[in-house]
Amino acid sequence: MEGRQRKRSVVWSYFSPTTPGNAMCSICHKDVRHCNNTSNLFKHLKSTHPFTYQEAERRNDANQKMLLKTSLLPSVPQIKCPSAPRKTVKKFKSDPDKLPKAGHITESLIKMIVSDLTPVSIVENAGFRHFVKVLDPSYHIPDKKSLVEEEIPQLYEKVQTTLKQSLEYASSVVLTTDMWTSNTNESYLTVWGHFVDQNWKMETCNLLTAPLAPQHTADDISELLLEVSNDWGIATKVHAVVTNNKANMISAVKKCQWEHVMCFAHTLNSVVKDAIKADAELTPTLEKCCEIVAFFHQCRKASDMLKEVQRQLQMPEEKLIKAVETRWTSVLDMLKKLSDQQQAVVTALCLSGKSALCLTEEEWSTISQTIKALKPFDEATQEVLGEQLVTVSKVLPLVWLLQKATTSAGLHNRLASMLATQCKQHFQNLEHNFTIEASTILDPRFKSLVFIDARNVEIIKSKLISEMQSLCSFDGQTTSSEQSVFIKSTDGLLEVKSSTANTEHNSGSCSTSNTGLWQEFDISIVASRDRQTATTNPHNEMSRYMEERLIPRSEDPLLWWKNNAEMYPLLSKVAKKYLGTVGTSVPAERLLSEDGETVNQKRSWLEPENINMLLFLNSNLHLE
């Protein structure tokens, strides 16, 4: 009877007997004394797990109602009748973990953890466990250990296999990389790969996140880059690496014998920061603006006063923006917000007794001039950070536009003049980076339009033609074999030494008769044309491409090449290589800014290889 009572009570769904008179809570794993009844067990749920207690109460009430209905049913006399002998059916206890539904739930749980960068320890949280039990009481939530040691590694291997297959089809790969520091002051290096796939879509993938020695030497970085490229089988496909302009990064790429491409966003940041620093008259105004913003952020009374003034003036109730030293765009955002809220800010300062912080007319004029000078650089930064279209081909046009804008505005704007000077210093060698030059020429939106030196354009075209010619040799001797099948006989006439298939193909393409008086002449024409293919096709393709009209700037250059690849079979392969180069490593850093938060106190127990799996899946889960 005692055993049946325990089975009948719903409270045993949350406890398991340990020793006589004791049971362990399956939620918090605490031993609870039950004295052969369930009162203490319910009391434990009520005091420690209130959500679970409410669920147990509902289930208990439902069971009581069911028992009451059963007891009220009229009894039916049992009638024995002959029946066929029963077959023995082997009974088995279903394991929820083996059910297909349970597998899908576990997989979805893992995807939630890696997509949202949620701590794996969530599976131990009482609220989460209660939530899952309400959704599916039969589902057994895996523990943290099994997730980290079994489930997540299995998904990692699955996605890794898919990514390797994609990289096998990639003709060339560009790497971006940068360092970041966790909350525990450990240094990590994340490496990303970028390539244009078979459908002419730009693909970006996380290849590795690994701990880095505190010294951050070029040797350490280059060793890691080579290790990553070898592990993924792309060492011979990497043709460029995009990083910031720090000496150790540039040196590391050169040690790997790859071409280094400067991160355009980093360079823009240096241009603006150096120009602002060089403008001695601007610095006091910026410091005063920072004081104003800090006052409203730190004083609740002043903040409320600003909101009240904004309401009375029927202005948007917006907070002032604080500038961050590492991001010049935040300086621009701060100045724009102050300018937009000028009347409200001045009124609130006066009412708060802080008239000394009010800006003078000259300082407000300086703010206005600064906003005008920085606006083109803000537009350029946002343009490059777009991740859908090719970005490296926009670098030269954007630099050309920035230099033009700052030069014209510099006549009446002190900061614009300094920005023009910094542009010349930081971008003076830009037209000597072949990857950037080639990508610009091969972008049907720009081609040679922004090149200052026409002779440089011819040099770039010549190098691209050489690459196409090397592709002819590398792709096999198809063209040359077609040439060699036609040889001269002793009487000076052409003799056909090719296979029937080749002869049919060549003669068919000439739409001539295969017999009769003209046969030898027609074959000689085909042979002459095939001999020209290996030497003139690259030149012809380049000439025809350069004569094509420019497409609108809003259109996707990759889509243009996809639609025209058959017309330019050689040049399209070269275009896929160079247009697959990103112009900045900042999109990678955008996630890296979250990575530092990933390794916080709740995740500090993670080993480096687990951090790598978590961030790898976070970026590449769409490949699964």
Image (cartoon, rainbow, N blue to C red):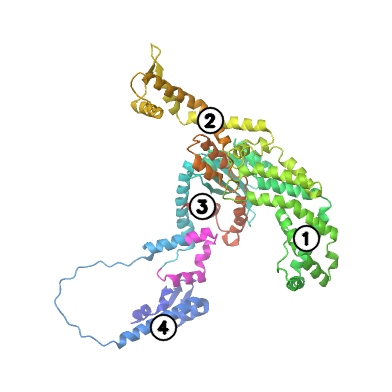
Note whether 567 is above or below 381 in the view shown.
above
Alpha carbon distance from label 4 to label 3: 47 Å
Q: Quadrant of residue 66?
A: bottom left
Q: Residue at x 25, y 66 (%)?
A: 90
Q: Nearer the viewer, mark 4 or mark 1?
A: 1
Of callouts 2 and 4, the N-terminal one: 4
Q: Residue at x 15, y 74 (%)?
A: 83
The quadrant of the image that shows the N terminus is bottom left
Of callouts 1 and 2, the N-terminal one: 1
Q: Nearer the viewer, residue 51 or 439?
A: 439
Q: Which residues are magenta?
A: 109-138
Q: Which mark is residue 472?
A: none
Alpha carbon distance from label 4 to label 1: 63 Å
Q: Which residue is mark 2?
A: 540
Q: Which residue is mark 4?
A: 61
Q: Nearer the viewer, mark 3 or mark 2?
A: 2
Q: Which residue is mark 1?
A: 290
Alpha carbon distance from label 1 to label 2: 60 Å
Q: Nearer the viewer, mark 4 or mark 3?
A: 3
Element marked by disc 1: helix
Note whether 470 is above or below 185 in the view shown.
above
Is 478 left or right of 222, judged from the image as shown?
Answer: left
- Disc 2 residue type (three-letter): Asn
Of callouts 4 and 1, the N-terminal one: 4
| Mark 3 neighbour density, 10 Å: few (under 14) some (14–19) many (20 or more) | some
Q: Position of residue 33 (x, y in %)?
A: 46, 78
Q: Position of residue 573 (x, y in %)?
A: 51, 37
Element marked by disc 4: helix
Q: Which mark is residue 620?
A: 3
- Asked whether the residues under the numbered discs 4 and 3 touch, taking CB atoms below 8 Å apart as contact, a structural biologist would say no
Task: Answer yes or no: is residue 375 visible.
Answer: yes
